[in-house]
Image (tube, rainbow, N blue to C red):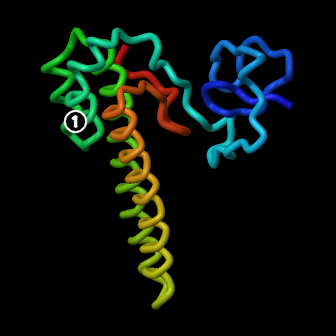
Amino acid sequence: MAFCNKCGAQIDDNAAVCPACGAQQNAANNANPNPIPNPIPANMQGADYSGQYDPNDVQQNKVMAVLAYIGILFLIPLLAAPQSPYARFHTNQGLILFIVDIIVGIVGGILAVILAFIPIAGPIIGGIITFLLSACTLALMILGIVNAATGKAKELPVIGKFRLIK
């Protein structure tokens, strides 16, 4: 049993490339007797494109990349750093997250109206569902900010595969 040098995923003993993250493998470094399990299933993890970006671009545009995840502020890196591939990657992720957040708000509002007709339990259930959906978008926002601030270009889980900005 072997584990990826980069992400820690379990791989075949003779694998040259990790199927989860695509990292090149060195068989001598793959032995990991105490792997840390990844809480996100492999099929839901976003791809890691960190190695594709110029380190100078990453260093110069970390602040822009962080701003991309804070609501409507995704427009700032879109306008201020349009030539930066790193900022553009995070701007796309932030735009998708912004759209998901709007959808969550609309769904929460519709649920509140529908469930308002159920005495006592309806508003409570609607509030819990809306809270959980909002907590998920907040968690994605924090994950995106952490990735951007640490110079990583990782797709957000579940929603990161969508591309609106090339």
- Taking 89 as reference, is 67 above or below it? below
Amino acid type at image mark 1: Leu
Residue appearing at x 36%, y 32% in the figure? 150
Q: Quadrant of the C terminus?
A: top left
In this image, 63 relative to 156: left or right?
left
Q: Could you tell me which residue is drawn at 22 percent across and 36 percent down?
A: 67
Q: Height in image: 52 above or below 117? A: above
Q: Quadrant of residue 164?
A: top left
Q: Is residue 95 visible?
A: no
Q: Is residue 154 visible?
A: yes
* Helix, strand or loop at mark 1: helix
The residue that label 1 is drawn on is 67
Name the residue nearer the viewer: 35 or 64: 35
In the image shown, does 14 or 98 lie closer to the viewer?
Answer: 14
| x then y, percent, for residue 124 | 45, 81
Q: Split into 4 quadrants, where in the image is the N terminus?
A: top right
Q: Is residue 64 left or right of residue 133?
A: left
Q: Where in the figure is residue 136, as x and y percent of width and height?
A: 46, 54
| Left or right position of 90 against 9 | left
Count of numbered badges drawn on the protein: 1
Q: Is 38 in front, or is 161?
A: 38
Q: Quadrant of residue 108?
A: bottom left
> Residue placed at 68% from the left, 36% from the top?
42
Q: Nearer the viewer, residue 3 or 75?
A: 3
Give the residue displayed 65% in from the left and 44% down from the top: 38
Q: Residues within 10 Å of mark 1 (few under 14, many from 20)?
A: many
Q: Residue furthest front?
A: 28
